[in-house]
Image (spheres, rainbow, N blue to C red):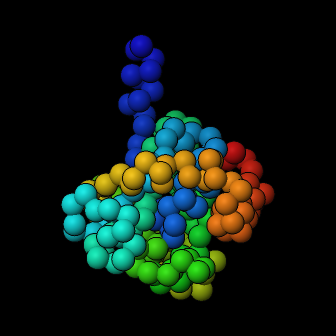
Amino acid sequence: METNELNQENFKEIVLGGGCFWCIEAVFEDVKGVENIINGYSGGKIKNPSYREVSNSKTNHAEVCKIIYDEEKINLNIILEIFFLSHDPTTLNRQGNDIGRHYRSIILYNNKEEKQIIKDYIKDINSNLFSNNIVTETKQFEAFYKAEDYHQDYYKYNKEQPYCKIVITPKITKARRQLSKYY
């Protein structure tokens, strides 16, 4: 029991949004050091929003994933590397055919240290990989609202659904091919 409590002291959380939360969740699902992923909503002002309210752009929330990770096994820079590979951070309020502010690229940091790590990481890849076109919103984390149960582990239980086959599976394949050392 003490070991488990000790290990949990190393757990950190970061909230990321990069389009549909099913995609981000699926990409991070088998990453070494990622302990849990919870799909939800964040970045807006409405408390306890529903999927319908968020997807109808009534809340200013984004679809996000709360990534819970063990910092002894993985660090924030690796989380960011996977995140930026798994979506297009240069498109405003959309990912592919998923269009709307709730699909924006967003990172919600917890403290000044995380803010600086994220700022430095984005500055580096923005100039070296993305020709200064990154539009990812970064802001202080305020609140997270867990999405409805049917949104949790969606890809895991629905791999044969057309959206999963056409959109999510290629993202997972790309991530595992380019970043295999993290899986």
| Quadrant occupied by the C terminus | top right
The part of the image, by quadrant, that contains residue 86 is bottom right
The part of the image, by quadrant, that contains residue 26 is bottom right
Q: Nearer the viewer, residue 85 or 158?
A: 158
Residue plotted at (36% across, 77% down): 56
Residue occupying the far right of the picture: 177
So how many labels did they put on this image?
0
Above or below for 178 versus 119: above
* Image coords of residue 58 (percent x, y): 29, 76
Left or right: where does residue 1 sit relative to residue 97? Answer: left
Residue plotted at (47% across, 51% down): 150
Whether residue 117 appears in this view of the structure is no
* Image coords of residue 43 (percent x, y): 31, 67
| Quadrant occupied by the N terminus | top left
Residue plotted at (58% across, 61% down): 23
Q: Nearer the viewer, residue 45 or 107?
A: 45
Above or below for 32 versus 114: above
* Image coords of residue 147 (percent x, y): 39, 54
Left or right: where does residue 114 sit relative to residue 36? Answer: left
Left or right: where does residue 172 sit relative to residue 136? Answer: right
* Image coords of residue 140 (percent x, y): 29, 63
